[in-house]
Image (spheres, rainbow, N blue to C red):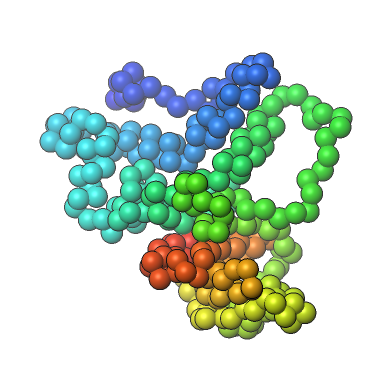
């Protein structure tokens, strides 16, 4: 208990309920800041730092460096692979990638460190969070959410037009839904192509399944269908890498897309992103 008091006195405590009521104007200014406050990276960083300080003691702290950045660099220098297994890349880039963890929907993946989050999605996430924390009843003129499916999260290069990005959509499905019931990865991939091209009803749109693969995680009892395909039309040529899986009434779909002309330089990045996509629950 004494050690905990000393640590709290030095580093402070993290208060989940530390958001006070404020005016409408102040709320608008807090939206993006609120997203950062509730980010998994910040919470994990503080928990990891406190546990590390308690575990290694003050003498080792001097040897490793008193600041957390020095501690993180020390561990990553020993083994980047172990650093990624410990999910330190949610705090500090490893090999040019950083990790996103969605604790609400239960998934994670890594993406290039120089990519940024979709600001529109961040704004909507902040608004949803604000509604969840609010003690006020919902407005009488509020409308139910539309059936339009939008990504839960998306990342891409700064200033891009959306042609190059990675996104994840989590859709509600029947509790007993199983993606394996629709066939093998190749069969599902061909079905995806038919859906995109309208089963041949759009002659100007052509889809080609490049390859398909099944990745299994026996620890989490999860199966991931990994698909790679091209979509072409007179106005664009696009390359996609997609990962699909399902669990507990949710269908998870990660999709990374790029113009075909940029594919050779992004191929390794896309394969790395797809391989890193995992359920966390």
Going by the picture, which residue comes out furthest to the right?
140
Relative placement, left or right, of 259 versus 266 is right
Tell me if residue 21 can be seen: no
Quadrant hosting residue 68: top left
- Residue toward you, 116 or 212: 116
Quadrant hosting residue 255: bottom right
Relative placement, left or right, of 84 versus 148 is left
Residue at 38%, 38% (x, y): give it.
Answer: 45
Tell how many labels.
0
- Residue toward you, 99 or 150: 150
Horizontal and vertical percent position of residue 277: 48, 61
Residue at 47%, 46% (x, y): give it.
Answer: 158
Going by the picture, which residue comes out furthest to the top?
23
Residue at 39%, 48% (x, y): give it.
Answer: 114
Going by the picture, which residue comes out furthest to the front?
234
Tell me if residue 32 can be seen: yes
User: Is 32 rendered above or below residue 82?
Assistant: above
User: Is 151 rendered above or below residue 143?
Assistant: below
- Residue toward you, 202 or 132: 202
Relative placement, left or right, of 201 versus 232 is right
- Residue toward you, 128 or 173: 128
Residue at 78%, 45% (x, y): give it.
Answer: 145
Please identify the quadrant where the N terminus is shown: top left
Horizontal and vertical percent position of residue 118: 55, 46
Horizontal and vertical percent position of residue 178: 66, 72
């Amino acid at each position: 208990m004494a050690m905990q008091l000393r640590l709290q006195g030095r580093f402070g405590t993290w208060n989940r309920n530390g958001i006070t009521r404020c005016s409408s104007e102040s709320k608008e200014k807090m939206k993006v800041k609120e997203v950062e406050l509730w980010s998994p990276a910040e919470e994990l960083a503080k928990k990891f730092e406190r546990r590390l300080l308690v575990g290694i003691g003050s003498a080792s702290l001097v040897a490793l460096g008193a600041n957390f950045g020095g501690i993180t660099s020390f561990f990553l220098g020993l083994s980047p692979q172990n650093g990624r297994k410990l999910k330190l890349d949610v705090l500090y880039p490893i090999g040019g990638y950083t990790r996103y963890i969605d604790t609400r929907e239960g998934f994670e993946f890594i993406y290039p460190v120089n990519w940024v989050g979709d600001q529109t999605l961040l704004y909507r996430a902040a608004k949803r969070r604000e509604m969840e924390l609010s003690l006020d009843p919902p407005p009488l003129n509020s409308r139910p959410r539309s059936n339009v499916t939008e990504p839960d999260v998306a990342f891409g290069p700064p200033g891009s037009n959306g042609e190059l990005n990675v996104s994840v959509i989590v859709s509600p499905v029947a509790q007993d839904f199983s993606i394996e019931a629709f066939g093998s990865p190749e069969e599902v991939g061909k079905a995806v192509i038919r859906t995109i091209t309208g089963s041949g009803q759009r002659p100007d749109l052509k889809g080609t399944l490049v390859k398909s693969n099944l990745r299994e995680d026996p620890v989490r009892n999860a199966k991931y269908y990994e698909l790679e395909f091209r979509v072409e039309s007179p106005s664009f040529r696009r390359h996609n890498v997609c990962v699909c899986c399902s669990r507990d009434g949710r269908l998870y779909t990660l999709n990374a897309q790029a113009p075909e002309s940029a594919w050779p330089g992004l191929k390794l990045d896309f394969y790395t992103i797809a391989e890193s996509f995992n359920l966390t629950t």
